[in-house]
Structures are given as structure tokens and as C-alpha cells.
């Protein structure tokens, strides 16, 4: 067996899994001793045609060993084929890859290009720090027609008022919820945005807006891909079953040794997200994700949804001329039980942002205080980490 480790720039993976090969993908920013441990444990597991993806979850404790999601080469290929079918990929299409290869979103693009025999071009942003201007230049130079980004990257494009190149026909947005006002602003600049929802466990997308939604500017519904079944269980927790489903997890136990577990039941995987489904007979016509379990908070006796607050923060950032790096945290509060706090890297613009936010949000969801931090700790996809202590450490 040949074992491939993503040791290229920004975690780029020069060889895809295939005959008698397996690959470990993890954030190259992880400490070298953590990477070595991951390498050792996955090699010890053995097997061929495996894709080991080290999760970069937003809630993992500092210094903790990442959970590893175990896929097969065939499950990743099935996911890629389903996405290609949904996007009606044609031989003349080309993918521009701007997401890190060690994340399922970036790896999925490689698989989609390979399965359809398409050209794939890596933007400089895949190999170095994200830069919206470089990304647009690369889109124009490559004449790519397909791309995938996360909301934070789309926000940067909109703030800079970059118009979409004419050659781009689909821009899939995933990784976290897309704020409706950001969608509207992106569409006004011509970006052909398709909202999507997916999981590392399913190899990529579970549900994506249809191509027909590009003909209007109404916030689109997401439809499950053909190879995915979805349902909701207790408390509207989303469950999924798919041909592209992962094999299981490798997790560090109390002793520090990795142990394999398969949480699926009859092929169904229970997520950590709350969702609602719209049915047309026995067919799921749309999927709406409301946020993660545990991200609804009682503040002064009023239930507050974190996902809604983050959408309002994006709206406030779009309205403020000079945007500071900022994120929301829910912190303990002696009087209210919990409170919303804004973390910002600049006091003046942070307070301006909080004021605009509070004009939009009434009652319990208002920002109670602004805390200045050296930087905003984020995952590789730009999502703020959920542990407030992470933001207090110099980066």
C-alpha cells in the first residue's frame, strides 16, 4: 500500500486515492506532533483505498486530537458523481478549486473533476492565504465555469464589490449557513450562487439549490441529491443515508489511542443539525437547516437562535463602511443566564458594528458588550471557533 499524506502547500494533495493507495488529509497548521500521531494511527489501521479526513470542527478543544472521518475511495466517487449530475456538468466545464484539499469540500472538487474528465485549476488561494482579488483574477484567467466557496469568502467578494466573471455558471456556497442578505447582495453582482448543505460524513453535498433557481433572485430552497435520503427524528434532528456515506470514525479514547466506531444504524447517520423537510408525496422537495443542536440559547427566558444572530451580524457588516474582524460569542451571564458578546479586533469599529447590529435585533439577542481580542480564531474554512478562550490567545 502506498500511503499519501497531504504535505503540499496549504495541505494540497498531489495524488488521489486509487489502486492500493490511501490518503490522510489534515490541516497542515496542526502541530507537527499531532500530525505525526494522526499519520501513525491511520497507518496502523491499514487497508487500501481509504480516505482519512481529520475533522477541523469548530468546538474541538485546544490541543485535542482531531476526530478522523473514514471514507473509501468509492464513497467519495459516488458523492462526486451525484454532484456532477445535479449541476448538469458538461465536458466543456472546468472547476476552479479555492478550498483547501484537506477539507471534504476541496477534495470533493478533485473527485468531481476526475469522474467527469474535467479540467481543474487551483487558485492561488488554495495554496496560500485567501485573497478575493487574486481569486477573481484566477477565475478570469482559467475561464472556469464551476467553483465552490464558503460564506466568508463570498462576503469578501461582495464587500469588495467584485462582479462575477461571465464564464462562471455555478458558484456553490457551503460549509455553513448563508445569510439571506449576503445572498441578495451576491446575486446583485451577478454571482450564480447555489446554496448547499453537506457533511464530511456524506462525502460532500446532501442538498443543493437547483440550477433553475439561478433564473430568479428569491432565496432558493435546497433539494436533496439523488443518492441521498433524508428524514428527521426526535426534536427535528436531521438523519441521512447515502451511497456516499462514510465508514465510521477514528477517535482518541481516554488512553490517547485511536478507536474505530460506526455510529450509523441501518445505514442512517444522525447529524447534530436541526432541520425541517417539505414533502411532495413521498419525495422530499426541500430541506431547511435551522442550526446545530445546542446552539439555541435562553437569554433572560427568551429563546435565541445562534444561526439567526449570525445572519444579522453579516447584514450589519454589509452596512458598516469599515468592517473589523468580528464574531459572536454566547457567554454566561449572572443576571440573564447567557448573553451575546461581540469579539472584535478593533474597539471603535467593533462598537459601530454592535450599534448597527442592535438596531436590527431587539430584546434578548442584542449585543451586551464588545470585547477586543488580538485575532478571531477560525477554522480552515473561515468559521469562527466556538470556544471563547481560543480568541484570547495570540495567533
Image: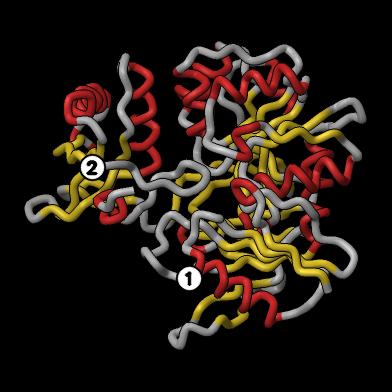
Residue in view at x 77 percent, y 56 percent: 76
| Label 2 Cα neighbours within 10 Å, binned few <14 / some 14-19 / many ≥20 | some
Question: Who comes first in sequence, dot 2 or dot 1?
Answer: 1
Residue in view at x 63 percent, y 53 percent: 102
> Residue 65 — which label?
1
Q: Looking at the picture, does residue 33 appear above or below residue 352? A: below
Residue in view at x 69 percent, y 31 percent: 147
Dot 1 falls on a residue whose secondary structure is: loop
The count of marks equals 2
Residue in view at x 79 percent, y 37 percent: 86
Q: Position of residue 170 (x, y in %)?
A: 71, 26
- Residue farthest along the left direction in this orientation: 335
CA gap, disc 2 and disc 1: 25 Å
> Residue 266 — which label?
none
**Is 138 left, or right, of 296 in this rendering?**
right
Q: Quadrant of residue 164?
A: top right
> Residue 373 — which label?
2
Amino acid at each position: 500500500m502506498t500511503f499519501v499524506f497531504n504535505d503540499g502547500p496549504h495541505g494540497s494533495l498531489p495524488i488521489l486515492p486509487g489502486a492500493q493507495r490511501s490518503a490522510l488529509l489534515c490541516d497542515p497548521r496542526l502541530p507537527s506532533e499531532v500530525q505525526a500521531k494522526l499519520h501513525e494511527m491511520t497507518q496502523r489501521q491499514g487497508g487500501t483505498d481509504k480516505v482519512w479526513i481529520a475533522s477541523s470542527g469548530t468546538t474541538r478543544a485546544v490541543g485535542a486530537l482531531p476526530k478522523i472521518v473514514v471514507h473509501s475511495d468509492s464513497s467519495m466517487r459516488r458523492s462526486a458523481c451525484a454532484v456532477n449530475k445535479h449541476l448538469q456538468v458538461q465536458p466543456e466545464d472546468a472547476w476552479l478549486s479555492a478550498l483547501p484539499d484537506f477539507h471534504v469540500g476541496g477534495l470533493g472538487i478533485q473527485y468531481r473533476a476526475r469522474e467527469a474528465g474535467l479540467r481543474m485549476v487551483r487558485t492561488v488561494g488554495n495554496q496560500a492565504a485567501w485573497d478575493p482579488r487574486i481569486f477573481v483574477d484566477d477565475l478570469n484567467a482559467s475561464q472556469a465555469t464551476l467553483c465552490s466557496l464558503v460564506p466568508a469568502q463570498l462576503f469578501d467578494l461582495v464587500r469588495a464589490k467584485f462582479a462575477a466573471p461571465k464564464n462562471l455558471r455555478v458558484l456553490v456556497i457551503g460549509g455553513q449557513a448563508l445569510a439571506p442578505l449576503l445572498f441578495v447582495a451576491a446575486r446583485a453582482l451577478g454571482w450564480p450562487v447555489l446554496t448547499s448543505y453537506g457533511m464530511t460524513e456524506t462525502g460532500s453535498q446532501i442538498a443543493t439549490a437547483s440550477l433553475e433557481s439561478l433564473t430568479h433572485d428569491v432565496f432558493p430552497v435546497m433539494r436533496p441529491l439523488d443518492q441521498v435520503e433524508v428524514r428527521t427524528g426526535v426534536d427535528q434532528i436531521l438523519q441521512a443515508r447515502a451511497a456516499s456515506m462514510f465508514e465510521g470514525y477514528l477517535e482518541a479514547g481516554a488512553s490517547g489511542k485511536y478507536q474505530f466506531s460506526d455510529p450509523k444504524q441501518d445505514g442512517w447517520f444522525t447529524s447534530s443539525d436541526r432541520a425541517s423537510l417539505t414533502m411532495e408525496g413521498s419525495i422530499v422537495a426541500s430541506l431547511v437547516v435551522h442550526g446545530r443542536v445546542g446552539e439555541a440559547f435562553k437569554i433572560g427566558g427568551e429563546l435565541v437562535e445562534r444561526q439567526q444572530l449570525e445572519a444579522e451580524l453579516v447584514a450589519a457588516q454589509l452596512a458598516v463602511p469599515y468592517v473589523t474582524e468580528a464574531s459572536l460569542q454566547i457567554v454566561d451571564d449572572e443576571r440573564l443566564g447567557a448573553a451575546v458578546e461581540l469579539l472584535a479586533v478593533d474597539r471603535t469599529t467593533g462598537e459601530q458594528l454592535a450599534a448597527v447590529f442592535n438596531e436590527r435585533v431587539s430584546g434578548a439577542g442584542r449585543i451586551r458588550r464588545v470585547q477586543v481580542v488580538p485575532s478571531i480564531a477560525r477554522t480552515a474554512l473561515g468559521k469562527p471557533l466556538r470556544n471563547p478562550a481560543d480568541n484570547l490567545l495570540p495567533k
